[in-house]
Amino acid sequence: MEEEKKNNFLEDIIEADLAAGKFDTIITRFPPEPNGYLHLGHAKSLCINFGLALKYGGKTNLRYDDTNPTKEDVEYVDAIKEDIKWLGFQWAEERYASDYFDQLYEWAEQLIQRGLAYVDDQTLEEMRANRGTVETPGTDSPWRNRSVEENLRLFREMKAGKYPDGAKVLRAKIDMAHPNMMFRDPILYRIKHAHHHRTGDKWCIYPMYDYTHGQCDSIEHITHSICTLEFDIHRPLYDWFIETLGIYPSHQYEFARLNLTYTLMSKRKLLELVEKGIVSGWDDPRMPTLCGVRRRGYTPEALKMFCDRIGVSKRDQLMDIGLLEYCVRQDLNERSNRYMVVSDDPIKISITNWEPGRVEWFEAPLNPAAPDGPKRRVPFTGELLIDRADFMEDAPKKYFRLRPGGEVRLKYTYIVKCEDVVKDASGKVVELRCTYDPLTHPASGQWRSVKGTIHWVSTAFAKEIECRLYDRLFTLEDMSQVPEDKDYKDFLNPESLVVKTGWAEPALLDDPGTLAVQFERVGYFKKDPDSTPDRLVMNKTTQLKDSFKL
């Protein structure tokens, strides 16, 4: 009997709130800043926010935190929506922080009128110097005690564009000695003369994240504002703004962010990799972006399985990327089509007792998980190619692939025996002369068992393809532990992409390419958009086997 899955702490909170009649409908939100592409860490947040709303009959809003026009772009807005839909989620309302700029400005004037906000002329460097430390209180700004009338005039002049960038800011007037550094007169607005992708040139002052986020949640009546653990120190200020303004009491809850081995998920560093040409773009299959792993062949189902397995906790953990790859294999194993592909530098097999020019077609299942499902036709001739790794001249006792005088079954077809080995002038094996046993036809022959079965392709029908073999982008297991005297780029894996030629059975070229396929006995590969009618490009999704243990 399957053990009942226990609630995580967020589910406990929501169920307690519903039982107490605190809310009629659960409303969550996903609030990305449109300054880059979503990555695997966002996938966890998406699964949590949308998953909780779905479980409890609620809804989730998509709200862009578009308060920094110098770094944001419509390209990212559209890409984020595409990624969310690809994961299989649908938001209830599409909102933007910029939708609420007028209301946020009005609330800022209310804070000024109540003596809770002031215009400060200090530079950012001066403000940092006067902020104090955890052990020592900060120093009041020389402009902290400006009159309400002067602050209103200056703030309206800021809005009207009278001052250049950096000349003034609006700060909350709270407590420069507060033990929580977030309360030491945080900045509410800064001047940025920049064109906004939605509001155009209407505004030249833009609200800061800490002033914007909680109020946007409140406007949308978000019941459970769920974010990652590094924002826990922001929560008291989130509550202070809501309580001070007397608006709908949204509340913030934090969970541990996703950290993966051999991976980093800093949008700033990922952008640097793109801009410096270290990777081919945001969708490079080595990138941890959702568009990158999609191009590599990962599936939404695999990502959801992974997020479900790692769970929701309050403690940061470094998750083994092997678990993610395991989930990818688990999903693809049930659904992906199979084909035989021989890698570059193959060995030719000549079947000496095969009738010259004869072609025999074998039927093979597209997916062994559905033996009665669709089939593919595989041509068999007297000249074949096999992987070089499937032959060993001086083989150990437990080597069950092809050896001189040894037998193997060529997958789906006959048993063959290696009779002779042909080498070139350098001593490299270039050809194996074999005989086949016609009585071992798998459908009509006499069953005879051999321990080894290998894949192959017919030379006359083989299709040349490009195989891009992707590996982990970094060599350091925990990329959060880069030594101080090193740059994160010092740990780039020089073998993260190796391009090779492969030889495929012809049926592969007719595969629709919507899902990664399995190269039998090798791994999973996904058709790349770089493919042309004359050149099929396949990206390695993940290897077939791995040492990862559950």
Image (spheres, grey):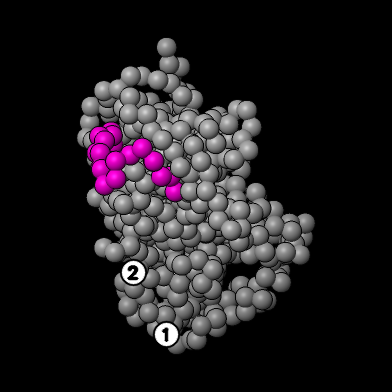
- Residue 476 in view (yes/no): yes
Q: Is residue 88 left or right of residue 490?
A: left
In front: 294, or 500? 500
The vertical placement of 141 against 264, above or below, is below
Q: Earlier in the sequence, mark 1 or mark 2?
A: 2
Task: Give me the residue at 60% from left, 64% from top.
Answer: 185
State if disc 2 and disc 1 touch (CB < 8 Å): no
**Range of residues picked out in magenta:** 348-366
Percent position of residue 353, x then y:
36, 37
Determine which residue is flagged by label 1: 161
Task: Give me the residue at 55% from left, 83% from top.
Answer: 167
Determine which residue is flagged by label 2: 74
- SS label for mark 1: loop
Q: Is residue 44 left or right of residue 123?
A: left
Percent position of residue 138, x then y:
71, 65
Is 548 included in the stretch rendered in magenta? no
Q: Quadrant of residue 449?
A: top left
How many other residues sit within 10 Å of disc 1, few (<14), some (14-19) or many (≥20)? Answer: some
In front: 538, or 391? 391
In front: 6, or 144? 6
Q: The residue under label 2 is which amino acid type? A: Val
Q: Residue placed farthest to the top in the image?
A: 1
Is 364 included in the stretch rendered in magenta? yes
Please state which of the two labelled residues, at mark 1 or mark 2, is closer to the viewer. Answer: 2
Give the position of the N terminus as an image quadrant.
top left
How many other residues sit within 10 Å of disc 2, few (<14), some (14-19) or many (≥20)? Answer: few
In front: 144, or 391? 391
Task: Give me the residue at 60% from left, 47% from top.
Answer: 261
- Residue 87 in view (yes/no): no
